Amino acid sequence: MRRTFHYAIPERLRGVLQAGSRVLVPLGRRQVTAWCVGLVDRPAVEDPKEVLAVVDPSPVVDTAMLRFTRWLADYYGASWGEALEAALPAAVRHGAGKAVEHRVSARVPPEELRERSRACLGRAPARSRVLGTLAEAAEGEVPLARLLERARAGPASVQALVRQGVLRVERCPVRRDPLEGLEVGATPPPTPTEAQEAALKAILPAVEAGRYEASLLWGVTGSGKTEVYLRVIEAARLQGRGAIVLVPEIALTPQTVRRFVARFGSQVAVLHSHLTGAQRAHQWARLASGEASIAVGPRSALFAPVGRLGVVVVDEEQEGAFKQEQRPRYHGRDAAVMRAHQAGCPVILGSATPSLESWNNALTGRYRLLRLPGRAAGSLPRVEVVDMAEEFAEAGGFRLVSERLLEALGRALAAGGQAIVLRNRRGHATHVHCPRCGHVVRCGACDVAMTWHRRRGTALCHYCGAAREVGTRCPECLAGELLYWGSGTERVEEFLAGRLPGVPMGRLDSDTMLSREAYEKVLGAFERGEVRVLVGTQMVAKGLDFPGVTLVGVIGADATLNLPDFRAAERCFQLLSQVAGRAGRGPTPGRVLVQSFQRGHYALEAAVAHDYEGFARRELTYRRSLGYPPFGRLLAVLVHGRDPARTGGFAREVARALGSALGPTVPVLGPVPAPIPRLAGRHRWQCLVKGRGLADVRAALAALDAVSPPGRDVQLVADVDPA
Ligand code: ADP
Ligand code: ZN
């Protein structure tokens, strides 16, 4: 539905109805809520039907937002309505939510939760997931909404457990303003360094003139980029204008928030995903009324009602998390550039390791490149590769953590430092298999190996959430003794606890971090030095600024290099650079040890040498030769459905339609089975259009509009600029 319709405005609503309000209108035989996107004197159709009622007494989006969402829908092949819906938080759309939040806690110890979880595995899977999820959480009290979302369960399963006396649900009043009571020490802003001064000098004229201009602010972590953002925002404020600052969700740590609040006080509205509906609606209203003028949040903050935009900032612009994985599948960074363009204000993209797209834009002069060399405080850490093939040969077998890393850990801790260990897989063992018959424990509904979660005592599917009990014997041949292969954060933590007795550790992954409180508690303990070693997934790689960290260890970050993804090298390089940036932010120089089986890979070598430019040069050559972004534009098409034959058949039809619409010069790859060929019981096929430019992508979207799936079950997902 990419169309707009005309309706007549009855006498009683004339002068009342404005563009940007929702209305009730007849559509066929139904009545639907629709957006009034504009008023015209003459309808394009004869005898239009009448608007029945106005839902919003005053517009809920302004004309700038109408224009922006229209572009967004158009560009990403979504409907305007979907884009408008993405623009308004549900709580704002449905009227502000209640100022209470339901929180769940256990009335029995964690062991009993686990036992009960296993006991009702087959009989009541949702209940089992609720119990298991809660047992793994680091903090006892969890918001109900989050628990249900993580456990993929409905409220009924929690109610049943409350009746059994296992869980307790409490209604807790929430502070309307999540920033209330946040302690911020007002430290005077530092004097800008020469490089910061130069960057400001380049950006500020556009702020003062209210002119669009894109800058890529390139500087390693700790080089003082945030300080530049703060100063630019200050300048915008002096012009009576506001700002939008996009950060990856994960970087919305209390640390980041505190810095903005310390500088701008109540002018800041923070929009992270842990807000309750009421809190979100409150922050939204503060921005809409002009009481606050600086929106800080993840990609959805792009739609924040900042009236007069003075600057848009995208920090860590290379982050894949800016891409929304539901319709409309927009990329927060690219959409931010358009938002600034439409608003007539500068946009700053900041990164230590820019995306190849932005880097290329800087090379070709579309973006201005501003560089912050070196660190404002501290120095760059020394990065070393631990060759695991050598370790393997020496130790006569596989080692999870090398002797070299263990020794370095011991030394760093003895010297009073702290350490971060990255293992970008959660769980205990990444797969369970039988050495006798080769059987691998797989999810019944997805084509993936299940991950063993030891504390929880079950294997889990990381894609659909299904849980299953596995014993010591192979369920297939009934003879082999199962092996638990591959290691996640849970096993790494356990291993290190065994080798470093008495050293307090913390774990940061999406299993343990079910609430914002849990996250803040672990980080708080780490900040105070009560936790000395922090083990975690990519959660530990981003945004953390702890001067006490002198050592970073990386376990198997290069495993992703083998994934069939043209961004694999870029992702690996970025993750390594990011996590390395956590070390040596204080006076003591940092050291980083990367365990790898792929010594010699250019992504790894470049990360070791802190050589972004060298990496980008190689990577761009490769991308150019294969027509990948930034030298081509991709459209990924996914077809999924329950019936394998009908799904596959439709995927072939889609590929044919794309092929004939685009002609022989535009490669259409596929259909091939998706990397996960079956997910939650649905078969998945994909096609990839390697467009030369935007026109090819548009032609492909038009071709997709013309094919229709064979029935409701088969669905088509089109993803423009897939991440
Ligand atoms: P980035 O955003 O690039 O990671 P930050 O802006 O967070 O860098 O700066 C890193 C650290 O250096 C912070 O603790 C910050 O307070 C400090 N800092 C930034 N600019 C200056 C400056 N001009 N003088 C002294 N310290 C600075
Ligand atoms: Zn599954």
Image (spheres, rainbow, N blue to C red):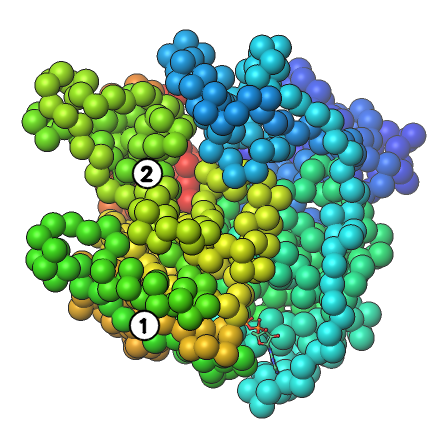
- Front-lying residue, 61 or 551: 551
- Residue found at the very far bottom of the displayed protein: 194
Identify which residue is drawn at 45% across, 73% down: 584
Q: State which quadrant residue 118 falls in.
A: top left
Disc 2 Cβ-to-ligand 2 distance below 8 Å: no
Q: Which residue is disc 1 drawn over? A: 383
- In this rendering, the answer to whether 511 lies above or below 157 is below
Q: Residues within 10 Å of mark 2 (few under 14, many from 20)?
A: many
Q: Which residue is disc 2 drawn over? A: 428
Identify which residue is drawn at 42% across, 54% down: 503
Residue 110 position, x and y percent, is: 49, 27
- Front-lying residue, 292 or 105: 105
Q: Is residue 507 shown to the viewer in this render? A: yes
- Residue found at the very far front of the displayed protein: 502
User: In the shown orientation, is residue 652 left or right of residue 695?
Assistant: left
Identify which residue is drawn at 57% across, 38% down: 139
